[in-house]
Amino acid sequence: MTDPTPPNPAPEGAASPNPTSKMARRRARELALQGVYQWLLSGNTMATVQRHLESETERLDRIDRELFVSLLRGAIGSADELRAVFTPLLSRPVSELSPIEHAILLLGTHELRHNLDTPYRVVINEAIELAKGYGGTDGHKFVNGVLDKLAARLRPQEVDAARAAKG
């Protein structure tokens, strides 16, 4: 039986889904979270995790693939360095973090450090949404607290400007 869905489901004359839209970026973060989580639990290589996700994920055209690859490779490839950045802000050892919290903190730390075109509030909000969707009951509060402190350290001018604008 063939798949009845055409390769581009957009009506004729309509634009195809924008891979840099807000939803495409959110899906890229979700897929990167799945990959980092898988890497933490399996110990597989980054390339193996990426290949697996790409082969198992339908509609890759609906994600911001560039963001997905950047987050996945950045978080896994620099995991030790990223942990060294957020560990001083934790209230417990990294070994006591849930794999979801750990993965989200790796992704959020990477994005705060390297995706300077994404406002820090967006990075934190996306991490909170991931924690609410995939983490434990109060995991989003923990992630919020750590990344909020981290943003103040990594992006002090942006945070100060936002606080000053708030009044």
Image: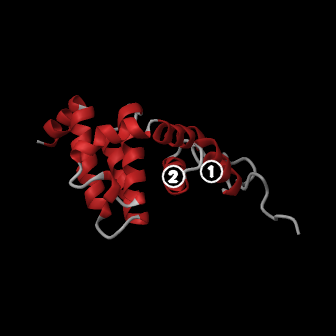
Tell me where residue 153 appears, x and y as whole percent: 22, 34
Tell me where residue 79 appears, x and y as whole percent: 43, 40
Q: Give the residue at mark 1.
A: 62
**Amino acid on which the number 2 mark rests in the picture:** Met
Q: Earlier in the sequence, mark 1 or mark 2?
A: 2
The structure residue drawn at horizontal position 32% and vertical position 59%, both measured from the top left corner, is: 96
* Vertical placement of residue 159 versus 58, above or below: above
Tell me where residue 21 appears, x and y as whole percent: 52, 45
Q: Give the residue at mark 2.
A: 23
Tell me where residue 43 appears, x and y as whole percent: 54, 51
The structure residue drawn at horizontal position 25% and vertical position 49%, both measured from the top left corner, is: 146
Between residues 107 and 16, which one lies in front from this camera angle?
107
Which quadrant holds the N terminus? bottom right
| Mark 1 vs mark 2, CA separation in Å | 8 Å
Do the residues under discs 1 and 2 have CB atoms within 8 angstroms? Answer: yes
The structure residue drawn at horizontal position 24% and vertical position 50%, both measured from the top left corner, is: 90
Secondary element at image label 2 = helix
User: Can see residue 111?
Assistant: no
* Vertical placement of residue 117 versus 92, above or below: above
**Amino acid on which the number 1 mark rests in the picture:** Arg
Residue found farthest to the left: 167
- In the shown orientation, is residue 96 left or right of residue 71? left
- In the shown orientation, is residue 31 left or right of residue 160? right
Secondary element at image label 1 = helix
Residue found farthest to the top: 157
